[in-house]
């Protein structure tokens, strides 16, 4: 059975205020990193509790604006979700490419 994986935009404490100021919708985010982190951990725990794999997609204040520009997106929630989804998909592809090949005839008598 395939594992479902989702990406979540994740921030580092040192970058939170800077990123919040850069985002078009930064005012919609919690005021402090600690407030954001509490909410993010609850979401993470809920998703993993539901059996999903969760990939934390760290948003970097230098790389993310470049990514948004390359994808024709504004720096907002839609872009953060798209970035997190792309990170999760990239991680899944990398994980699959490193799995050993399975012989379908192994274990058969």
Image (cartoon, grey):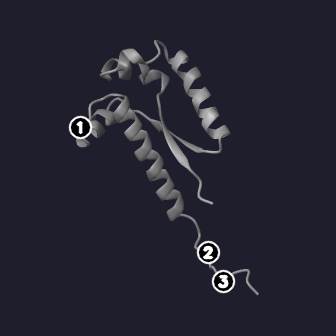
Which residue does the image show at 38% across and 34% down from the upper left? Answer: 80
Residue that badge 1 annotates: 69
The residue tagged with tag 2: helix, strand or loop?
loop
Q: Hey, which quadrant is residue 25 in on the image? A: top left
Image coordinates of residue 61 in percent, x first then y, are: 35, 29
Q: Which residue is mark 3?
A: 105
How far is the residue under mark 2 from the one under mark 1?
A: 41 Å
The residue beneath circle 2 is: 102
Please say if 25 is above or below 86: above
Direction from residue 107 to residue 70 in the image, left or right: left
- In this view of the protein, which residue sits in the foreground, 22 or 40? 40
Residue closer to the observer: 78 or 91: 78
Residue sitting farthest toward the top = 31
Quadrant of image for the N terminus: bottom right
Residue plotted at (59% across, 21% down): 38
Q: Give the Cα distance between marks 3 and 1.
A: 48 Å
Mark nearer the N terminus (3 vs 1): 1
């Amino acid at each position: 059975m395939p594992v479902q994986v989702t990406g979540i935009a994740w921030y580092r404490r040192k970058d939170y205020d800077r990123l919040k100021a850069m985002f078009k919708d930064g005012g919609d985010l919690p005021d402090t990193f600690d407030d954001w982190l509490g909410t993010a951990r609850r979401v993470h725990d809920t998703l993993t509790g539901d059996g999903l794999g969760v990939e934390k997609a760290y948003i970097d204040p230098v790389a993310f604006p470049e990514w948004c520009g390359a994808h024709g997106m504004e720096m907002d929630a839609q872009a953060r979700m798209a970035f997190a989804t792309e990170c999760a998909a990239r991680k899944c592809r990398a994980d699959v490419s490193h799995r050993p090949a399975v012989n379908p005839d192994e274990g058969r008598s």
